[in-house]
Image (spheres, coloured by chain):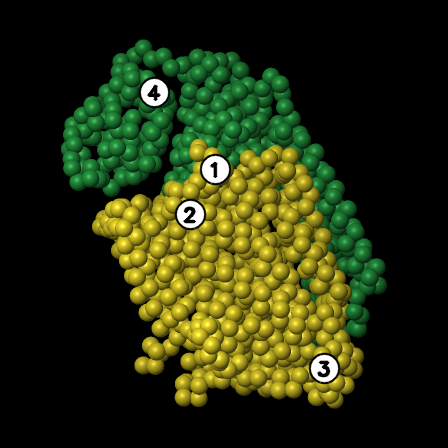
Amino acid sequence: MSFFKSGFMRGLIAQIIGTVLGMGLVVGIRAILGLEAWSSTNLEILEPIIVGGALVGALSFLIGVGVFSDWFKWTKGISTVDHHDPDPEKPSWWRYFSVDFDHKIIGIQYGVTSLIVLGLGGVFALLFRIELSQAGINFLNNGFFDLFFFGDTNPFRHSGGADLYNSFMSLHGMVMIAAILLGVGAMSNYLIPLLIGANDMAFPRLNAFAYWVNVPGAILLVSSLFLGGFDTGWTGYPPLSLRAPLGVQMFMMGVYLVGLSSIFGSINVIVTVIKMRAPGMTMFKMPIFVWAAFATAIIQLTATQLIGLSFQLVMFQRLLGMNFFDSVTGGNPVLFQHLFWFYSHPAVYVFVLPGFGVISELLPVFSRKPLFGYKWIAFSSMGIALVGFFVWAHHMFTSGMTAYLRVPFMYSTLLVAVPTGVKFFSWVGTVWKGKLRFPTPMLFALGAVVVFLVGGVTGPPNGTVATDLHLHDTYWVVGHFHNTIFGGFMFPLFAAIYFWFPKYTGKMYNEFWGKVHFWGMFIGFEIMSLSQMKIGLLGMRRRIADYDPALGIENAQYWITIAGFVVFFAVLIGAINLIQSARKGKIAEGNVWESRSPEWQIPNPAPLINYEKPFHVVGEPYDYGIESDYVDMNPAPLVGE
Amino acid sequence: MIHFVVVGILTLLSTYGLYMFVLTNEILLPIQASEQAIAIDNLFDLHWLLISFFFSLIMVFLVYSIVVFRRRKGDEGAGEHFEGNTTLEIIWTIVPLIIVLFIAFRGSEALADVERRDPNAYEVTVIASQWNWQFEYPDGETSSDLVLPKDTQILLRMYSQDVIHSFWVPEFRVKQDILPGGEEYIRELRITPNELGDFKIRCAELCGQLHYSMLADVSVVTESKFEVWLSEQSDICELDDITCGNKWVEKNGCVACHSLTGEVIVGPSWLGLYGSEVPLDDGTTVTANEEYIRNSILQPASQVHEGFNGNLMPPSFGDTLSAEQIDQIIAFIQSIK
């Protein structure tokens, strides 16, 4: 079967071979240094060997899949064509499983990978939600889990149900973050060239690299589960992460690779937006999503290094004994938290800004009205990105950092409410006196506004230090945070998937099942997250495998689990709808949503070369209701063109 | 204009309804059991009011638009054409900015209230370790429960022996992480209990495998009861060895990891341990006699029972227990058959 010859399969095989070679390399080095070279049970000896294997394995995947091929040729002085056309002898799906430089293919690759990883993170959540549905540890210690996690002969075994709970809970967090970053990549890569009138991203090879490095990254992340897991949460605070099982190394290396993707991807977005806009498209005539993606890329380019660095220091301390964070011998555990949150707070704006862009993009189309206060929305994205850099220590109000610092960070944190408020008011201004239509993408966009509103208004109590002393590390924060991410990312992601579905498949999705997906997800999610906030106020701590029934929260816990399943099955229905519609849906021709945007002026699905002839921008992007165009698809040549 | 009047009235009604719903909800927060909780709960009330207002404001506008401005069948036209309003944008930037600064100012005041120092505060040392709490009183009395006199400011001076933990009693509201690393990393927390009752300390910072069960009892008692209790906690025991051993075991929290029932928690159970043949992780076996148990207390990582992790137990008991106390603990273990 030809599938086994695809780049993806070649990459996987190369990763396996590379892992073995890498392990051999470390064994060899240990032997030369006169250390005990190998042991099948002693984890102190196994750890550097396995980490070495994982590193070489990940590199081998990238070589095997072929992202370096053109670059290798260039170093040897061999020139390559600018754009590789699809091989007519290969089936059409081939391109999706191999290295391809077309931004639309890469966008779809990001998107599908994102949904798969999202599903995986959802399964982890369900597993530990089942455990929490009743007090007592009575699910994750089940014999069913023996095979992978508990067996006596397994040197990487978990030591019980609570331990396995910690691994699933920790991995749920990081796997979901990886899924979100992939989803952000999907939206930016697929949409930006189409929206600004370019035929590809600025650096197509870097783009392919930025996608493919996620695959070994995700494999390493999930492999941590089978190498002892890790009980540190996604935050990986030392000294706990210094004492955690081997899985923590795979987790940190996985994050490192996914972080590389963010950095390279964001360079591409920034250059593409600055250099490749259609004639006449000034910055303030760009579709608003492009502003959001641009602000996102600036954060990704400048903050991601800090989480990579903080995790790298933990890895070095474990592997090489360099002490950075152990206070007994001169390190400082609180320093890690500063480095970590310097990325991880701005990261939440990476997750939600593209979603805000999608909401702002869709509301005018379905309200048949201009976007209210275009410039204010664009500036508020930049404002959030900027202020977002000065608030990281609000995650550390109880951490024992320098006490007076809590006050300035309280002020800066609450300031984020101002640009966020501008967005809400502008969205309300956009739908006010419109003629609203409610197909599935509009439902998801409006749902996103409501869910993010719940997340937004529940934020300030975490921002004022005194109330945060009660709320920190409780389920209140869990509920608040999930509202911001569902409102800022999950709902807008699905809005985008449904809205542009005809553009990338040429088919129409099934409206009925789309609406079932929306209502299931919306109602299930709010029952879940409001209950989480309620039990958090009453004393339910985050990240615990079991809770005290005396808190009177058992009933709520049960309903949170049920509601979690509703969310999961709603998304599953959505996924089946998308697959079925892509195969058998009605053909969707032309400008399905009567949008003014340029990507709807070309055929569905978007052709191999987006715009054979560059369009000119001649009007405003959202002037619904007046006789004018945003773009002229058949412009007279400009002077000098 | 009529639209704005209707929306304005609905927003006020919704704000009032939501705020009343929140305020009359008796199980919103745990009971208020400290002076610090008063300032915090007052700030919570301000937050609930603002949450009720802003949530209502946006929701009423949104739902009203969805209902009133929905497209009627057959209407293919566009909505009313307006592209923005700079005056409005400036208003809804400046007004929230003022509100935000006001909240931050009130937040600073509340923080000052919470941190107010009483120079005569009663000092208790809190020692956290994986998954155990220890409390030391000024004259060297130690306990694994925290007992506090009512209406006295307590100054907790806290440190950890291993990873980061966090001290939290929901009824007291306040929370503080506990750091490892000795003197320089000791962190303080002030609590003035003002309700008699029994509560629980709940470790609020993920600290590994048994984080969920890292609890300790807190009792707030009258001044006179406190004095009586304190006098019972001294390190003097004039009873028989087994009873005294049991006291040291309870005070040091040994049973958090070593069960007396045969159940395996994270350390070997003590049921039937004494005199049994113990398989070690280097493949040899050893008889669990007095010498082996003493060595396991003093150097937990040296003769490790197969299948257990010798690094989980703190190696510091040699410093905190006297030789006599260790003998009495061994006698107690010997009695668990």
x and y, in percent, of residue A587 in the image? 54, 86
Mark 3, residue position: A616
Residue A322 versus residue A144: which sits nearer the camera? A322
Disc number lying in front (2 or 3): 2
Q: Nearer the viewer, mark 1 or mark 3?
A: 1
| For the residues bearing labels 1 and 2, Cβ distance under 8 angstroms | no
| Amino acid type at image mark 3 | His
Q: Quadrant of the N terminus of chain B?
A: bottom right
* The label number, if any, that marks residue B321 in the structure image: 4
Mark 2 vs 3, N-terminal side: 2
The Cα–Cα distance between marks 1 and 3, rounded to whole angstroms, is 58 Å
Residue located 40% across and 37% down the image: B213
* Residue A332: image location, x then y, percent: 50, 37
Q: Colour of chain B?
A: green
Residue A547 visible? The answer is no
Same subunit, labels 3 and 4: the answer reads no
- Among the chains pictured, the one given yellow colouring is A
Confirm whether circles 1 and 4 share one chain.
no
Depth check, mark 1 against mark 4: the one in front is 1
Residue type beneath disc 1: Gly
Q: Which quadrant of the view contains residue A93?
A: bottom left
Circles 1 and 3 on the same chain? yes
The residue singled out by tag 1 in the image is A331
Which secondary structure lies at badge 1?
A: loop
Q: Residue furthest front?
A: A77
For marks 2 and 4, give the CA distance.
Answer: 36 Å
Q: Residue at x 26, y 32 (%)?
A: B302
The residue tagged 2 is A316
